[in-house]
Image (cartoon, rainbow, N blue to C red):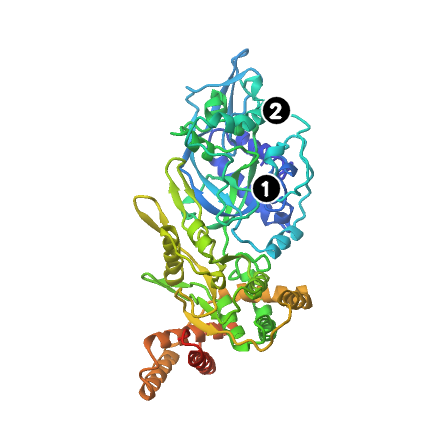
């Protein structure tokens, strides 16, 4: 094995060592993967790897090891590259083999040229994923990850983005001036391909592209939610990409590539710069621009390790079912009852003293799609909370409370303007050959709050009707039909939907609870601010762990309990067959399941079944009372 060296700062040097020892044999690739896998298993090793989620791009060293927490927004076509290629020295005729993996451009020494006809050339394939930060990721999640990082970074002297291409989440008044040119990539490259020139050409690109009707400016980074910040990355995956799909959340460890040549349009690159991607032939200028964007805006990560993320909560182990994590789970379950009681009190205060609504909100927060039976998603629990004050701060501040508890969320105000103008459904753009994102392209376990209290009189246009239909399909079937122009393609979802409304929602839901406030704060914002300030950070973290952990727990019902529930249902039908339907039984079973999980029980007991029936009686009784007061409520 080659010397360890700086595996964080100069991983390509280590890769070169493995390649030199094993020659053109592809065994060196397996050894590289195994080496980094073992290094990352060492104590706190992952915390030393800088994250693109936390660190501005200009603080990261080019060709260093980085990590990125992201969602797959799109998959590009597979691309071919030269896994092994040979260079020839023009003066001495000496031949040298090079590896092309984890690189974008050819690595050539002075006076060296690539021999395109060499018999030593090995062409391989890699898959490119367009990845964005997790949509709607909560601020506390970002802060938790950032605070656990031990990475040492400083502004890079070899790479600084231009002022027009500032890195994400920088202060608005920060001025970035390129202070030093990046070294020229080795090889037979034109002197005009230095660091400064591509930046100049990049700035001028929109002017040149104005003559091309298909090109737009500036480049759309394709974030699903409006107002999102962070880097978008092209992640190049070399192994086992068949198991990765659009909307998967990934944790990627790989080599950062920000070569300035990537900022130059394809038709302006010389032959050496594209040797490692011979299949890079785009049909349109817009496709070139989207698939080969400036590296200062969309850096490349050459993946060494890719993990599909089971959940989005940094307070939990990556996989709670691993043997080494069972102690964590059992320890937390031992204090579950006290955490639940505190959370119930917290949410009761947030919902203005309504304990019943708080009970159902807990069940909603811990719900998840755990299985599918044909097209029916099992486990979802969309909650409609009606009786919310119209045009008040209540729904906005309720969302702030929920955002403190869940790892990812979004608050969608259902105004006529938003419904008609926002893009909800992802759509395939065949000109640019990419998937244009939409609001409903969300990661699993995201909480979506639909605010109907902002809905005013007006008319939905065709787009608005389609958007409303898409929301209905998400709620009912937990799927979104992406628009591929000539057909629709179904993408499964796992999104917790909470609907706040004044009367009964116009959207479908699994459960309808009418809010009955017991207190009326003179100032809602002050009330919510005081409520959040009164909760200790350690207590909030327990609430966050509670919600995420219970979503991941298994649950089953024994045959004996199933028989008892069926007998009980038959008995209830005897007394009032009109008021107890199959839908009521299904809802009671879902409530009973979530109630059991909420107290840490993974199977249904008679006690929880009776409690579920009691909650449903209280909920329906409240709706009946409201119906007698206001005919709009069922």
Tag on residue 66? 1
Residue that appears at 62% across and 31% down: 162
Which one is in front, 482 or 530? 530
Residue that appears at 40% across and 50% down: 425
Q: Is residue 562 left or right of residue 145?
A: left
**Quadrant position of residue 139:** bottom right
Residue 314: percent from the left, percent from the top?
58, 56
Residue that appears at 55% across and 61% down: 406
Q: Are marks 2 and 1 in contact (CB under 8 Å)?
A: no
- Mark 2 → mark 1, Cα distance in angstroms: 25 Å
Residue 550: percent from the left, percent from the top?
51, 67
Secondary structure of residue under mark 2 = helix
**Residue 195 can be seen in this image:** yes
Secondary structure of residue under mark 1 = strand
- Is residue 56 depicted above or below 538 in this figure? above
**Quarter occupied by the C terminus:** bottom left
**Which numbered mark, 2 or 1, is in the foreground of this view?**
2
Density class for disc 1 (Cα within 10 Å; few <14, some 14-19, many ≥20) is many
Which one is in front, 297 or 75? 297
Q: Total of numbered circles in the picture?
A: 2
- Is residue 198 depicted above or below 40 in this figure? above
Residue that appears at 55% across and 20% down: 187
The residue at which mark 2 appears reads as 196
Residue 47: percent from the left, percent from the top?
63, 49
Q: Residue furthest left?
A: 486
């Amino acid at each position: 094995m080659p010397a360890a060296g700086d595996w964080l700062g100069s991983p390509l040097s280590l890769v070169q060592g493995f390649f030199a020892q094993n020659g053109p044999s592809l065994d060196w690739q397996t050894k590289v993967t195994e080496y980094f896998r073992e290094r990352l298993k060492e104590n706190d090793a992952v915390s030393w790897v800088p994250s693109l989620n936390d660190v501005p791009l200009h603080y990261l060293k080019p060709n260093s090891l980085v990590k990125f927490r992201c969602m797959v927004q799109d998959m590009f076509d597979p691309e071919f590259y030269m896994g092994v290629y040979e260079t020839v020295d023009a003066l001495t005729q000496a031949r040298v083999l090079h590896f092309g993996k984890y690189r974008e451009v050819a690595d050539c020494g002075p006076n060296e040229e690539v021999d395109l006809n060499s018999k030593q050339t090995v062409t391989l394939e890699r898959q490119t994923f367009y990845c964005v930060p997790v949509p709607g990721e909560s601020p506390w999640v970002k802060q938790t990850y950032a605070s656990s990082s031990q990475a040492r970074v400083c502004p890079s002297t070899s790479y600084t983005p231009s002022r027009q291409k500032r890195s994400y989440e920088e202060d608005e008044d920060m001025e970035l001036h390129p202070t030093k040119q990046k070294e020229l990539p080795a090889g037979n490259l034109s002197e005009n391909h230095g660091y400064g020139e591509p930046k100049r050409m990049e700035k001028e690109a929109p002017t040149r592209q104005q003559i091309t009707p298909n090109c737009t400016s500036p480049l759309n980074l394709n974030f699903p939610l409006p107002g999102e910040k962070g880097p978008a990355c092209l992640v190049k995956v070399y192994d086992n990409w068949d198991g990765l799909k659009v909307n998967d959340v990934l944790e990627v460890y790989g080599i950062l590539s920000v070569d300035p040549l990537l900022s130059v349009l394809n038709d302006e690159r010389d032959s050496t710069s594209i040797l490692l991607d011979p299949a890079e032939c785009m049909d349109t200028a817009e496709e070139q621009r989207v698939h080969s964007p400036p590296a200062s805006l969309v850096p490349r990560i050459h993946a060494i390790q890719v993990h599909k993320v089971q959940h989005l909560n940094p307070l939990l182990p990556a996989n709670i079912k691993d043997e080494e994590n069972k102690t964590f789970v059992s320890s937390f379950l031992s204090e579950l009852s006290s955490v639940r009681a505190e959370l119930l009190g917290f949410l009761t205060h947030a919902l203005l003293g309504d304990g019943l609504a708080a009970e159902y909100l807990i069940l909603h927060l811990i719900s998840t799609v755990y299985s599918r039976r044909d097209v029916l998603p099992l486990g979802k629990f969309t909650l409609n909370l009606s009786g919310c004050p119209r045009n008040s701060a209540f729904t906005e501040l309720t969302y702030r409370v929920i955002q403190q508890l869940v790892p990812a969320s979004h608050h969608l105000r259902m105004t006529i303007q938003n419904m008609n103008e926002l893009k909800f459904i992802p759509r395939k753009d065949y000109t640019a050959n990419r998937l244009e994102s939409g609001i409903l392209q969300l990661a699993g376990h995201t909480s979506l709050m639909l605010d109907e209290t902002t809905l005013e009189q007006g008319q939905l246009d065709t787009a608005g009707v389609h958007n409303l239909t898409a929301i209905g399909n998400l709620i009912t079937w937990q799927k979104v039909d992406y628009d591929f122009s000539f057909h629709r393609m179904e993408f499964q979802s796992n999104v917790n939907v909470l609907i706040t409304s004044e009367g009964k929602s116009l959207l479908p839901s699994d459960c309808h609870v009418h809010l009955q406030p017991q207190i009326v704060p003179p100032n809602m914002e002050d009330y919510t601010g005081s409520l959040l300030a009164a909760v200790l950070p350690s207590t909030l973290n327990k609430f966050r762990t509670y919600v995420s952990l219970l979503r991941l727990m298994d649950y089953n019902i024994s045959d004996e309990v199933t028989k008892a529930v069926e007998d009980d249902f038959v008995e209830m039908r005897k007394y009032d067959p009109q008021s107890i339907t199959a839908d009521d039984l299904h809802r009671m079973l879902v409530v009973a399941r979530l109630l059991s999980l909420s107290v840490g029980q993974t199977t249904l007991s008679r006690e929880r079944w009776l409690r579920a029936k009691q909650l449903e009686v209280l909920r329906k009784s409240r709706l009946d009372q409201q119906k007698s007061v206001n005919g709009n409520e069922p």
